[in-house]
Image (cartoon, rainbow, N blue to C red):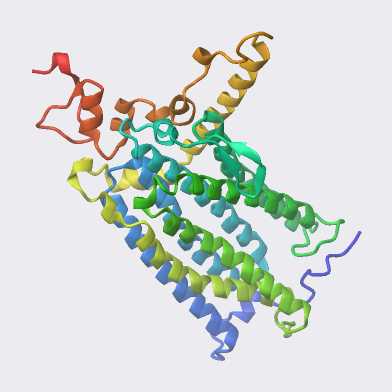
Amino acid sequence: MPTCPTADQLAADQADFWNPRDENWNKHKIGWVICGICAILTTIITIVNVSMHARNYRVPAEQRQILRIIYLPMVYGIIAFLSYRFFSAYTYYSFIQAAYESVALSAFLLLLIRYVAATSSEYSAQDALSRKDKRKMPLFGCFRIRPSKPYFMHAVKWAVLQYAILKPLISIISIITEATGVLCDGTWDVHFAYPYLEVVDVISMTTALYGLVLFYLITKDILASRRPLTKFLSIKIVIFLGIFQTFVLNLLAKHGVIHDNGYWTTSNIVKALNAFSTSFEMVLVSAFMMKAYPAAEYTTSAMGEPRGAGKAIWDSINLSDFGREIWTSLQWFFNNAKSRREAPVLGDVTNADDQPTFDQAFLPSYSHSMNAYQHGTRDNTRLLGQEGVHTPTEDRSPNATPVPLRAAV
């Protein structure tokens, strides 16, 4: 059976190497302390930002996605510290880190969709995109897209959400193959699992990023006031830095600039330097997140009363809305394909009456203004008035019970 050339060949006892009774503060132990300090700073900054959003949790549809994004540097920082401290288990920790990256990307897409819907007077994403004309796809000029059609949003959604499915699956397979000795991380040998998993991972991530960029280019004029580029860069910089520094460190190792030192193998040192750099970078990224996703946008009382910090945290860690989005999209594709197969040869190939509208298919929870009111919007009273619903003046909170106008006193 082939042997992985990058496997650790040096015997090093991690417990003894990090013995606290050893007063010899060498560069490895100093690096460990710095990583720990950076992880603590990143966690503190993230907690402050999260607490501000949790205290002003007035628009759950948007803020649950924001909280998921805000967690990203904290997750990266903690994982980087653990990867440096328990360097032999770096591969396992890196897969957990990468899996959460897919969650953050998916949350960002759903956040942009909520932003687009909020720009419409009817809180309708279809209405907001109805003025978008057919145009060429970026990098694929031979294809044209029509953003006003439901298929566009479903295609964009699947381009991103597939990464939230595949990335954790790739991480699980990678952990299993690493434990059984058939992964060989970083080696492009067809006898090991790494090259196959890496190809699928790169294709999946590229597709997700393309979907996000495409949606941003289509809606950047609509979302100008929400600074979508700043928000996107706060996520993209995390991904880009990880890819770039891994490439540079592997290149230095390949040319002998980085080599084993008797304690760590070359592979260990590359991973440790990567973890060290990440822990420092995440302090800056977490601070940048406070600027990109300020809680001040949700402090106005016109949005209603806060829903509570406990609900905010629970909503952010409860990923059931991802499952609903995926299932709803699957239903749309299935129903659309079915209607085309059953359509008569002559006449229309689809029955418009049987097809769900954009919001029914893609934003089922927000297809009606009443539902938008119940889940938190930016102008709840106005939306209810458009629907012929009256909210008692003594209770304008999002939890108020709407009353039909004809029944209002």
Query: Which of the 4 image quadrants contains residue 311?
Result: top left
Q: Position of residue 174 (x, y in %)?
A: 71, 53
- Please give left or right for residue 351 compared with residue 202 in the image: left
Q: Residue at x 12, y 18 (%)?
A: 408
Q: Residue at x 23, y 51 (%)?
A: 299
Q: Residue at x 32, y 30 (%)?
A: 122
Q: Position of residue 142 (x, y in %)?
A: 68, 41
Q: Quadrant of the N terminus?
A: bottom right
Instruction: Judge by depth and name the residue closer to the eye, 195 or 124.
Output: 124
Q: Position of residue 59 (x, y in %)?
A: 31, 42
> Up-down: is 124 above or below 102?
above
- Farthest bottom residue? 24
> Up-down: is 264 above or below 161?
below
Q: Count up the numbered dots.
A: 0
Does residue 402 appear in this view?
A: yes
Instruction: Judge by depth and name the residue closer to the eye, 202 or 355.
Output: 355
Instruction: Judge by depth and name the residue closer to the eye, 82 or 77.
Output: 77
Instruction: Judge by depth and name the residue closer to the eye, 345 or 87.
Output: 345
Query: Which of the 4 image quadrants contains residue 366?
Result: top left
- Please give left or right for residue 74 compared with residue 339 in the image: left
Q: Quadrant of the C terminus?
A: top left
- Farthest right residue? 1
- Please give left or right for residue 106 compared with residue 251 in the image: left
Q: Position of residue 276 (x, y in %)?
A: 56, 75
- Please give left or right for residue 12 compared with residue 288 in the image: right
Does residue 399 appear in this view?
A: no
> Up-down: is 56 above or below 377?
below
